[in-house]
Image (tube, rainbow, N blue to C red):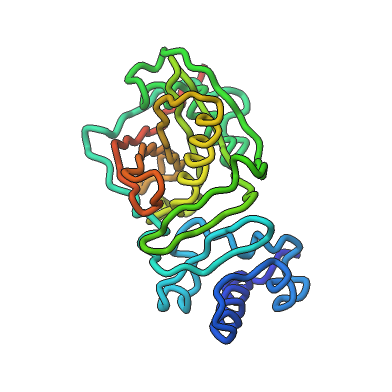
């Protein structure tokens, strides 16, 4: 049986209240397990909130959200508006009808991997990045990593300094062309377009890649994309793509939109 609806939110409220009593806002998976019993076999699942709409009202009222520190440690941080970025509207001239012939497996996987497969195989990523759907790019499908050297660093959220140490960082997808690298984080929404997304989803892979490249002695341009597949009000499936930069690479709150587009998927039968 699945967990009862609302258990995740109740868990976070319990943990936050415990932190308030202790006047210490870092906590770990052991505390989550102590406060929830066996509700979560993976305590990290209880602390992962991809959109601010899923934060408990109690946390929203206190203007706090959660960041991950590595080694099963987490922290409540002030400033939801810094931790979550509102998805910008797409200009009318950037909404495209995208005709393509679906592959046999298209639509069978509603995960992030399924979204990225469609985006790459149907040349959406190539068109968005280079205005040319036939442009050849190299792809890399990395694994989750928690290596010390590239996954340990400090960054800012407003006036707060966050230190991560051996943090597991997930990179969904990387493409490369002529030394330029683009990262992609993808989501598949079954309930319409989300209002916002957790900035760490694009920021942490960006920071990890900068460290890895610096260690290799190369500094190509790094582009950060956020993709979300959703069903439009007219019931058509669409893929939105956003490209962001960070004006200050050390500051997660310095995220800024460079461009976006929406691709309305028009699958054609063979």
Where residue 70 appears, as percent x and y from the top left, is 63, 55
Q: Nearer the viewer, residue 18 or 235?
A: 18
Q: Is residue 50 above or below residue 150?
A: below
Q: On the image, which quarter does residue 148 sit in?
A: top right
Q: On the image, which quarter does residue 106 sit in?
A: top right
Q: Is residue 187 above or below residue 29?
A: above
Residue found 69% across the figure and 68% down from its top: 3
Residue furthest to the bottom: 21
Q: Is residue 249 left or right of residue 110?
A: left
Q: Is residue 85 left or right of residue 140?
A: left
Total labels: the figure holds 0
Where residue 214 appears, as percent x and y from the top left, is 50, 31
Residue found 46% across the figure and 13% down from its top: 136
Q: Is residue 81 above or below residue 125?
A: below
Where residue 181 appears, as percent x and y from the top left, is 46, 26
Residue found 42% across the figure and 30% down from its top: 222
Q: Nearer the viewer, residue 226 or 222?
A: 222
Q: Is residue 21 above or below residue 140?
A: below
Where residue 47 appears, as percent x and y from the top left, is 60, 63
Q: Nearer the viewer, residue 209 or 217?
A: 217
Q: Quadrant of the N terminus?
A: bottom right
């Amino acid at each position: 049986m699945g967990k009862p609806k609302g258990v995740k939110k109740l868990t976070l409220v319990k943990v936050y209240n415990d932190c308030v009593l202790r006047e210490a806002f870092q906590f770990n998976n052991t505390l989550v397990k102590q406060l929830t019993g066996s509700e979560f076999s993976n305590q990290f699942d209880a602390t992962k909130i991809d959109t601010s709409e899923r934060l408990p009202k109690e946390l929203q009222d206190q203007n706090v959200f959660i960041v991950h520190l590595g080694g099963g440690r987490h922290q409540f941080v002030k400033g939801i508006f810094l931790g979550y970025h509102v998805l910008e509207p797409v200009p009318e001239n950037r909404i495209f009808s995208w005709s393509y012939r679906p592959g046999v497996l298209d639509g069978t996987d509603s995960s992030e991997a399924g979204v990225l497969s469609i985006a790459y195989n149907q040349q959406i990523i190539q068109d968005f990045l280079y205005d040319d759907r036939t442009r050849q790019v190299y792809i890399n499908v990395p694994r989750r990593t928690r290596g010390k050297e590239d996954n340990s660093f400090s960054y800012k959220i407003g006036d707060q300094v966050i230190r991560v140490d051996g943090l597991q960082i997930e990179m969904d997808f990387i493409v490369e062309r002529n030394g330029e690298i683009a990262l992609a984080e993808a989501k598949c929404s079954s309930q319409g377009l989300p209002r916002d997304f957790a900035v760490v989803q694009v920021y942490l892979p960006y920071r990890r890649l900068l460290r890895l490249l610096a260690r290799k002695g190369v500094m190509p341009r790094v582009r950060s994309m956020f993709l979300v597949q959703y069903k439009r009000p007219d019931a058509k499936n669409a893929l939105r793509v956003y490209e962001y930069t960070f004006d200050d690479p050390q500051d997660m709150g310095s995220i800024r939109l460079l461009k976006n587009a929406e691709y309305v998927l028009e699958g054609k039968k063979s």
